[in-house]
Amino acid sequence: MGDSLALLIHIESDDHDPLLARWLRTELFGLDIDRIEPVRDETDRPGARAVTALLVSLGPTALEPVTSKIRGWCAHNHRTVDLTLDGDTLKITGTPTEPEERLVAAWLAKHATNPQRG
């Protein structure tokens, strides 16, 4: 893809569950994305909050469907996920609020009009 985006997805986890990234990765496979790669978390240490990460390469038109799928996954699994695109991070919780809805809409609008070049 010419205008490929690199979306970093961090899944917050207190229980250090290594399956979380696999579950989310499986959910994302059906979408129009170029590649999904697991990212090894170097900060995983005893007593630390575990973060599982994926790096997703996708086109600008896939950003909204991918974000929507991740939001549904967070709600269903009661998880919090940080999406980072071009240094801009959006936190998605399992129980979205009205302010979160506005933040998601603004984040998507920003990146739809100013896509990062890969």
Image (cartoon, rainbow, N blue to C red):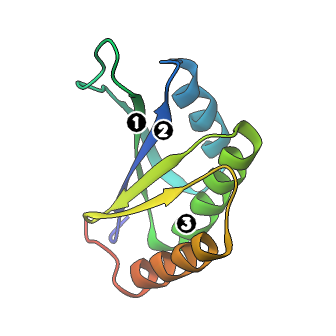
From the image, state whether disc 1 or disc 2 is nearer to you. Answer: 2
Query: Where does residue 95 sit, x and y in percent of width and height?
Result: 70, 54
Q: Nearer the viewer, residue 75 or 9?
A: 75
Q: Amino acid at mark 3?
A: Ala
Residue depicted at x 45% and y 72%: 60
Disc 1 residue crowd, few under 14, some 14–19, many 20+, Cα 10 Å: many
Residue depicted at x 63% and y 74%: 101
Q: Amino acid at mark 2?
A: Ile
Give the mark, 1 or 2, whose residue is nearer the N terminus. Answer: 2
- Judging by the rendered image, the residue that carries numbered circle 1 is 53
Secondary structure, mark 2, is strand
Q: CA distance from mark 2 to mark 3?
A: 20 Å
Give the mark, 3 or 1, whose residue is nearer the N terminus. Answer: 1
Query: Where does residue 115 sit, x and y in percent of width and height?
Result: 34, 77
Query: Where does residue 1 sit, x and y in percent of width and height?
Result: 38, 64
Above-or-below relation of 58 to 23:
below
Secondary structure, mark 3, is helix
Q: Nearer the viewer, residue 42 or 60?
A: 42
Q: Is residue 104 left or right of residue 59?
A: right
Q: Which mark is residue 62?
A: 3
Q: Are marks 1 and 2 in contact (CB under 8 Å)?
A: yes
From the image, state whether disc 3 or disc 1 is nearer to you. Answer: 1
Q: Is residue 25 left or right of residue 110?
A: right
- Judging by the rendered image, the residue that carries numbered circle 2 is 11
Q: Residue furthest bottom?
A: 113
